[in-house]
Amino acid sequence: MGELRYDPNIHHRHPIRLPDYQYASKGAYFVTICTHGRIPCFEQPALRTILEETWLALPERFPGLILDEYVMMPDHVHFIVWLNASVTERMTLGKVVGAYKSLTSVTWLQHIEMAGLNERGKIWQRNYMEHVIRGEGELARLRDYIRTNPLRAALKKDSL
């Protein structure tokens, strides 16, 4: 069965970003990126290493970017990043997430080819979910959510 293509007559995509918000604004953002098809491919050690190393290298690519909490689950990642609007080359949240997805995909494809693996190359689902963090209380709650996500997932798995 082939992959379903976008058809504007039957599919109704709605913007998921805030319409008037400037995603280059200084501040903290909570982001979730899911795997394509929600397949738990992040259980593979090599791919986990690629994701982690790319995450840690993002500030080199985007001066002024501050990494906060980060968690890698089997089929998604959550993270908090801080953008600094005073940096000369304006970064946007979309550029940061796009670079992360692109760099991890390219590195994974190179790894698959070099290792001669029979793995699928497509990692990421289209788009991502983001939330503009407003206030210290919300920041603390989201940090806690990220830190406890693996425990909640394990408890959920054990209860099934």
Image (tube, helix red, strand yellow):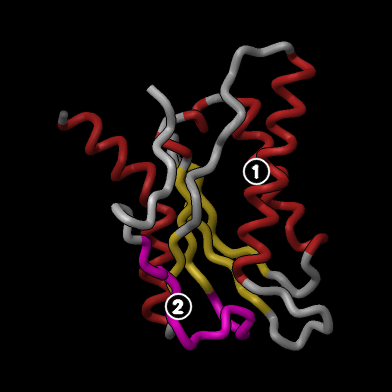
Task: Determine the main secondary structure of the stretch shown in magenta.
Answer: loop
Identified by mark 2, the residue type is Ile
Of the 4 image quadrants, the one containing the C terminus is top left
The residue pinned by badge 2 equals 133
- Is residue 39 shown above or below 126? above
The magenta span reads: 13-28
Q: Nearer the viewer, residue 89 or 7?
A: 7
Where on the picture, by quarter, is residue 64? bottom right
Residue name at image x 57 percent, y 33 percent: 122
State left or right for residue 89 relative to residue 106: right
- Residue 16 tag number: none
Q: x, y percentage for residue 159?
A: 16, 32
State left or right for residue 17 relative to residue 87: left
Q: CA distance from mark 1 to mark 2?
A: 23 Å
Identified by mark 1, the residue type is Glu
- Is residue 51 shown above or below 79? above
- Residue 52 tag number: 1
Considering the numbered disc 2 on the image, is that residue within a helix, a strand or a loop?
loop
